[in-house]
Amino acid sequence: MYYIYILWNSTTQRYYIGYTPDLRSRLKTHQLGNVKSTKSDLHYVLKWYCGFPYRDMALNMEKYLKTGSGRAFMKKRLLKSSAVALEKDNYSSDVSPAEALA
């Protein structure tokens, strides 16, 4: 199994997106300060992860999440509750779908 994961640092308000075949070991490496990108501030916590059966699938998803549209997708669909994620997708109760399209 191959994993992508998202770490969140509440101090710096930054995300770290990574890939690994061994999630537990990789998280320990982060916590010990042995990862160059996260060692300066060790306040990162695991916010989300997903397993993939193939390495290429995991690497493609990691690469996508590091793009602008991937970060928007991550924030809207992966890191928010379903109620918040769908909030912008719903029409306002004051406007009918026909009025919204006009």
Image (cartoon, rainbow, N blue to C red):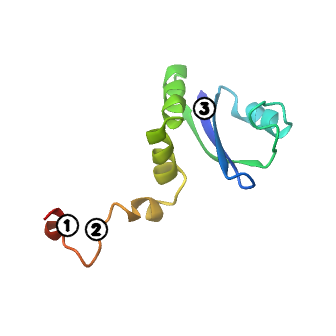
- Check the image and report above or below for 54 versus 15: above
C-alpha distance separating marks 3 and 1: 41 Å
In the rendered view of the protein, which quadrant contains the N terminus? top right
C-alpha distance separating marks 3 and 2: 35 Å
Badge 1: residue crowd in 10 Å (few <14, some 14–19, many ≥20)? few
Q: Residue at x 22, y 74 (%)?
A: 95
**SS category of the residue bearing label 1:** helix
Circle on res. 100:
1
Circle on res. 56:
none
- Check the image and report above or below for 45 versus 59: below
From the image, state whether disc 1 or disc 2 is nearer to you: 1
Q: Residue at x 59, y 34 (%)?
A: 4
Circle on res. 91:
2
| Residue designated by label 3 | 3
Badge 2: residue crowd in 10 Å (few <14, some 14–19, many ≥20)? few
Q: Residue 14: x, y in percent?
A: 66, 47
